Amino acid sequence: MLRRSIAKLGTGIFTISMGCGALASDQASAPDKATGVQISQLTNRLRIEINGKLFTEYYFSEEAARPYYYPVLGPDQLPMTRNWPMKSPPDEEHDHPHHRSLWYGHILVNGQDFWDEQKKFGRILHEGFDKIESGAESGVIKSHDNWVAPGGNVVCTDDRTFRVYNTGSTKERLFDFEITLHASEGDLTFGDNKDGAMAIRLAETMRLKGPKGRPGQGHIVTSTGARNEDTWGNRADWCDYYGPVEGKTVGVAIFDHPQNPRHPTWWHVRDYGLFAANPFGRHDFEKLEDKSAGNLTVPAGKSITFRYRFYIHEGNDKEAKVAEKYAEYATKGSN
């Protein structure tokens, strides 16, 4: 396997070395900072701005157990995810320290834990960037990682693409996340467990049940029509979680790509704000006796790809036309 690395040459200009020559982004294609999607590299993260305003930052250093995005800002720059554990605000519950804003992981990968950050857990370690590209209509980050067990052995590798769009509206945010997991070290088994995989931990005020015993003001709905408590373990094309942030109703919808393995996925969506698409937790979600019913094995040397779209919106699912947005995604697919 070729070693790949990235070196910053200047603001917005990167060279990607793949062991045999170099590729450079076109400086002229980088948009003005006040327009389009601008991605810039800081010491331990990438900063992503849309039309001159912060959208999110991608943390990829080894300080955390796996890469994550924080903050995630939605309509009118409202915070869509909680601050803990990145910060310690007094009005948030300090539970589940591994729920870092927006991330990808799973608790059983060849028997290793790539979900928690307590006791013995594996780390998803950033290996390098293959592409960092700003643009008037969209920005793209392509990277690759090693999934490393507590003992130091690599369990598998991944390639991931994050593409964020400039929709031209301050009332919505739209981005795609694609991950290809490679059985690079032998057979790769994702074990049947509810704790995974494409996940976000929402702002405390959006919760179905509020923090510290307070009433919740959030709502959850899936494409099947399931609502609130009935959505957990439900299989559906999409799921939307909405509620108030700073007095305005906003929501996050996650779309499961029609070509994903085991589509439509199961939803590990909790009343306390955890929201995840998990294609591996069948025995938990369907209450089956066989605890391996949801196992998924990728043969050695092969790979598997999952694609998701996040639609961050103003209003509830009807006002935001979530179903119509999903239909458009399902027809055109992700880029």
Image (cartoon, rainbow, N blue to C red):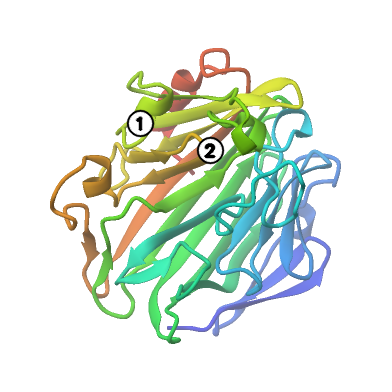
| Residue at 61% in and 49% down | 101
Q: Is residue 104 above or below residue 146?
A: above
State the quadrant of the N terminus. Answer: bottom left
Residue 115 in picture, x, y percent from top left: 46, 62
Q: Is residue 331 visible?
A: no
| Disc 1 packing (10 Å; few <14; some 14–19; many ≥20) | many
Q: Amino acid at mark 1?
A: Asp
Q: Amino acid at mark 2?
A: Tyr
Residue 259 in picture, x, y percent from top left: 31, 42
Q: Is residue 160 left or right of residue 83?
A: left
Nearer-the-camera pick, 22 or 202: 202
Residue 306 in picture, x, y percent from top left: 38, 51
| Disc 2 packing (10 Å; few <14; some 14–19; many ≥20) | many
Outermost left residue: 290
Mark 2 lies on a secondary structure that is: loop
Nearer-the-camera pick, 160 or 235: 235
Q: Is residue 89 above or below residue 156?
A: above
Q: Exactly how many numbered labels are in the figure?
A: 2
| Rendered image quadrant of residue 269 | top left
Q: Is residue 47 left or right of residue 95?
A: right
Can you identify the residue that label 2 sits on?
272
Residue 93 in picture, x, y percent from top left: 64, 46
Q: Is residue 24 visible?
A: yes
Can you identify the residue that label 1 sits on?
237
| Rendered image quadrant of residue 57 | bottom right
